[in-house]
Image (cartoon, helix red, strand yellow):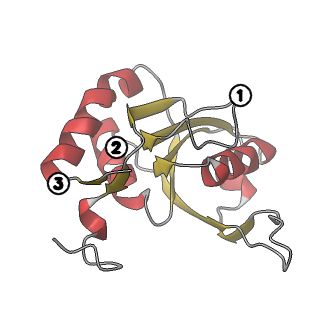
Amino acid sequence: MEKVYLSWEAVEQLINAVIPDLKGHHFDSLLAITRGGIIPGGLIAEKLGIVKVLIASVDFYSDDEGNMEWPVFMQFPIDSLLHGDHVLIVDDLWDRGREVTSVKERVEQAGGTATTFVMHYKPHRSIFPDDAPDFYTAITEDWIIYPWELDRAGYGV
């Protein structure tokens, strides 16, 4: 697996390439998954004119035997903010797909209609073989390092 460092310009180009497809749909709100979905979500909300921007934070923990637990939502909008809305869910990466699919399920349980977008999709690693993001900018097997991650975890170049 190769490390690929994206520039801000590359991120902008990737998002601009998918905006025409997204404009073909109506979204009442955008739900960005922290932390990776905040910046692409903000860029997309601005380009599509979505003013209702919400945040979801979800994590997964394993028990002592390494069994995966249910998702833990540290932050999530109340149901009334999602009910009846067509919600665009945004994250930076679909690696295994757990975060995006968990957030999508939670939006649907609240009575919203969910459409998913990720910057990069890794179908070879997904644990959901019958599911995929509705929109993505690229399929990859690489380790993508976004410009907003460069100062975090020693990625500096």
- Asked which quadrant contains residue 3, the reply is bottom left
Q: Secondary structure at mark 3?
A: helix
Determine which residue is flagged by label 1: 130
Q: Residue at x 60, y 32 (%)?
A: 132
Q: Which residue is mark 3?
A: 8
Q: Would you say residue 91 is visible in this rendering?
A: no
Query: Looking at the rendered structure, which numbered label has been put on residue 3?
Result: none
Residue 7: percent from left, percent from top: 16, 54
Q: Name the amino acid type tagged 1.
A: Asp
Is 128 located above or below residue 38 in the figure? above
Q: Earlier in the sequence, mark 1 or mark 3?
A: 3
Image coords of residue 43 (percent x, y): 29, 49
**Residue 78, visible in the rendered structure:** yes
Image location of residue 69, percent across then percent down: 82, 66
Mark 2, other Cα within 10 Å: few <14 / some 14–19 / many ≥20: many
Foreground pick, 124 / 42: 124
Q: What is the distance, in whole Å, between disc 2 and disc 3 at their CAs? A: 14 Å
Which of pointers 1 and 3 indicates the residue nearer the eye? 1
Element carrying mark 1: loop
Callout 3 amino acid? Trp
The crowding category of the residue bearing disc 3, from other C-alpha atoms within 10 Å (few below 14, some 14 to 19, many at least 20), is few
- Give the residue at mark 2: 44
Looking at the rendering, in which quadrant would you find the C terminus? bottom left
Amino acid type, residue under disc 2 in the picture: Ile
On the picture, is 81 further left or further right than 121?
right
